[in-house]
Image (spheres, rainbow, N blue to C red):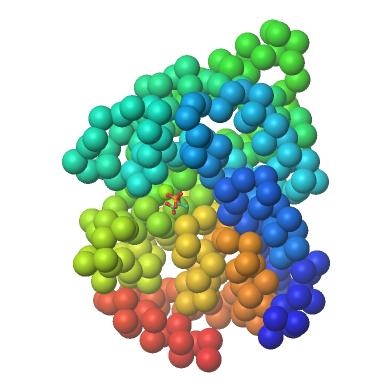
């Protein structure tokens, strides 16, 4: 099987009925690129920049971040690279920021909330991103967006830094797509409004599922509620994809669900444009998608959206793809 998959490294990801989807990789640092290319990644769908900030005693400088972003953009040779701004907090702590302990870290001061407040720190990262933008196909993505105001504030900071750089005589790419992670139910529900202002969505199911089911993604005792195939989750995913398409935008997914064998047929049927997963899952996913018909998966997804329980959905998927 591995040998069969290896033949697909340079293949396009096209369904039996000729529909192309993009299979991208999630990475944590520039060293991960080798694995992305070896496994036929068509892009980077999520670069988790928090790893630049972790395992050290002080904030990374603009130069350090610039070097990392440039390396990833150059390494991908013009293929799309979605870099997510700092998503710290929740389960990811930065001891040197010395933030007070919270009762509910996953519902607390994290990600974009923290960046919009700690603006000096955020601006350094935005400058590094903008400066790196000329070295490839950069798309910038904000994590944990809950309201349009947050998106607009983050976008305004980016715009300010861009103008500063330009007035300093630095180069910045003319067009940088700007998107958000959809990982909070409020944003999925309001996706039609967001779609008018963002360039793309990437659905972060790891968090979207935990917030929708109110089940901590780290807590074993409630892990039975962590149900990616629940009709409730599928309906949210559909809302996001449909909202993007209605405005001519694209929708991807970078949570674990995107690389999951049972989820892929459903996501294909719901019209997902980009699937971002760990590099080691890409070839297996490609081989699966090559054997699926998008029209048939659309029928499957439509049925699944009307089902009552996760088990019914799993049964239906198994029945369809066996
Ligand atoms: C997600 O929430 O699905 C996601 C991709 O982000 P992270 O796992 O880094 O929270
Ligand atoms: Mg997340």
Check the image and name the residue furthest to the front.
Answer: 57
Question: Does 204 sit left or right of 24 as displayed?
Answer: left
Vertical comparison of 262 with 115: above or below: below
Residue 314 location, quadrant: bottom left
Question: Does 251 sit left or right of 98 as displayed?
Answer: right
Question: Does 139 sit left or right of 201 as displayed?
Answer: right
- Residue 121 in view (yes/no): yes
Instruction: Give coordinates of residue 144: x percent, y percent.
Output: 40, 41
Instruction: Give coordinates of residue 265: x percent, y percent.
Output: 52, 75
> Which residue is located at x 64 percent, y 29 percent?
64
> Which residue is located at x 38 percent, y 33 percent?
95
Check the image and name the residue furthest to the top.
Answer: 167
Q: Nearer the viewer, residue 118 or 212?
A: 118
Vertical comparison of 14 with 32: above or below: below
Vertical comparison of 14 with 136: above or below: below
Q: Nearer the viewer, residue 299 or 12?
A: 12
> Which residue is located at x 46 percent, y 90 percent?
319
Q: Quadrant of the N terminus?
A: bottom right
Residue 12 location, quadrant: bottom right
Instruction: Give coordinates of residue 193: x percent, y percent.
Output: 41, 40
Check the image and name the residue furthest to the left.
Answer: 103
């Amino acid at each position: 099987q591995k040998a069969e998959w290896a033949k697909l490294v340079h293949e396009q990801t096209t369904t039996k009925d000729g529909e192309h989807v993009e299979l991208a990789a999630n990475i944590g640092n520039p060293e991960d690129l080798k694995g992305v290319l070896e496994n036929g990644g068509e892009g980077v769908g999520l670069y988790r920049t928090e790893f630049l900030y972790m395992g050290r005693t002080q904030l990374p400088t603009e130069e350090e971040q610039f070097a990392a972003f440039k390396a990833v953009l150059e390494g991908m040779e013009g293929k799309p690279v979605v870099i997510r701004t700092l998503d710290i907090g929740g389960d990811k702590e930065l001891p040197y920021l010395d933030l007070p302990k919270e009762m509910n870290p996953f519902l607390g001061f994290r990600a974009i909330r923290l960046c919009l407040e700690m603006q000096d720190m955020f601006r350094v990262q935005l400058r590094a991103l903008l400066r790196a933008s000329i070295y490839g196909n950069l798309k910038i993505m904000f994590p944990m967006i809950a309201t349009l105001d947050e998106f607009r504030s983050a976008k305004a900071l980016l715009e300010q830094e861009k103008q500063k750089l330009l007035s300093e005589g630095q180069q910045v790419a003319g067009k940088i797509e700007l998107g958000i992670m959809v990982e909070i139910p409020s944003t999925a529900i309001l996706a039609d409004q967001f779609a008018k202002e963002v360039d793309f969505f990437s659905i972060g199911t790891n968090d979207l599922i935990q917030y929708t089911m109110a089940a901590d993604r780290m807590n074993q005792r409630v892990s039975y509620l962590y149900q990616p195939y629940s009709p409730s989750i599928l309906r949210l995913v559909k809302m996001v994809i449909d909202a993007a398409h209605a405005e001519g935008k694209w929708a991807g997914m970078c949570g674990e669900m995107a690389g999951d064998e049972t989820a892929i047929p459903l996501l294909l049927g719901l019209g997902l444009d980009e699937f971002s997963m760990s590099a080691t899952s890409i070839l297996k996913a490609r081989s699966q998608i090559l054997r699926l018909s998008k029209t048939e998966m659309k029928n499957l997804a439509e049925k699944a959206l009307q089902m009552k329980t996760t088990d019914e959905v799993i049964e239906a998927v198994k029945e369809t793809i066996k």
